[in-house]
Image (cartoon, rainbow, N blue to C red):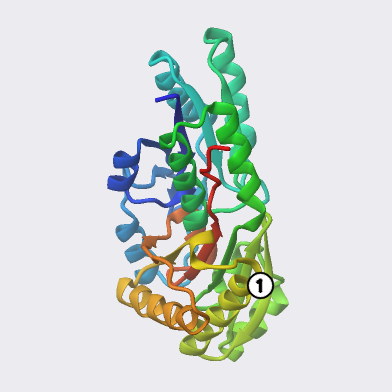
Amino acid sequence: MAYRIISDGSCDLPEALCKEKGIHVVPFYVTMDDKNYIKENVEISKADFYKWMVEHQGSFPKSSMPPTSDFLEAFEQAAKAGEDIICITITRKFSSCYEVALAAKELLADEYPDIKVEVIDSTVDTVLQGLVVLELTKLRDAGFDFEESVKRLRAILPTGRIFFTVGNLDYLRAGGRIGKLTGMAGSLLGIRPLITLKEGEIFPSGITRSRRKSMDMVGKLAVKYVTETFASTDAYVADIGYGYDYEEGKAFREVIAAHLREAGHRPDLPIYHIGAAISVHTGPYPLGFSLIQKADLSKN
């Protein structure tokens, strides 16, 4: 390979898919007791983590980014194989992973000065970050070199969006993602928020009073962006993210697909499991639709 693709664990891609595509993941850590941090997908599975959250309502687990040593270990493995490195990280607005990966890059240069390393702030997270990483694999597999791959990947980042909803506002409030008073009022009223992630930040996009209605409203937000931004299904890639309940994730996919069909769009919509790095802020019931412009694979 011309270069090795590394991502922090926020990309939320299945382990089997990462292995198939040659993606190396540096996991996040999670704690349920504020003392013992364990590696997600290594020492605790996503399913077990969600099960714990559901069984411990009112408790708020925390996540922690990988330390510099974890990134450095992943970088050294690539360097020993003689491979340059492109590393994708979660948005800097949510985590310092980008800065930590840069520190690992500097340390690597002491021993491997000829290895090129590019650390890219994806400006997104979770299953949308997964789409970014997969677009990079397409560039690599199409034969684009290190510099051209970086250039073409950066070009699509501003088009990325996640439209999502959560079960309640408790976790967003506890994590400081929304104001405490807003969160308290929302919890009392049973409000389900609609949220958009774009350009590294989250923005409120409305509220509803039922889970089904929130799923439908996400579909409407998605169609509005899709039809305003992309001429056809061929111009973008998309996926679905879910939390504790896979069956609800499938139902959400059907709602989104129905809205897109009405607008003449029929993208593939794989379903991926949202991980701990994000679910500690959303709670066990996030549902999201993400999409981004396809990377330019033309040889011109």
Name which residue type carries label 1.
Answer: Glu
Position above or below: 75 against 155: above
Residue 296: x and y, percent? 55, 46
**Residue plotted at (49% across, 78% down):** 264
Residue 72 seen in render? no
Q: Nearer the viewer, residue 219 or 61?
A: 219
Q: Is 49 placed above or below 56 here? A: above
- Residue 235 position in % (x across, y down): 54, 60
Q: Residue at x 32, y 71 (%)?
A: 246
> What quarter of the picture does the N terminus occupy?
top left
For image coordinates 63% across by 69% down, the residue present is 196
Question: Dividing the picture into quarters, in which one does residue 223 lie?
Answer: bottom right
Residue under pointer 1: 228
Q: Is residue 40 above or below residue 113?
A: below
Q: Residue furthest front?
A: 300
Give the answer, above or below, for where 165 lies relative to 23: below
Q: Is residue 137 left or right of residue 200?
A: left
x and y percent of residue 13 in the render?
Answer: 39, 51
Q: Quadrant of the C terminus?
A: top right
Q: Quadrant of residue 177?
A: bottom right
Residue 298 vs residue 180, the one in the foreground: 298
Secondary element type, mark 1:
helix
Query: Is 246 placed left or right of 202 in the picture?
Result: left
The answer to whether residue 240 is visible is yes
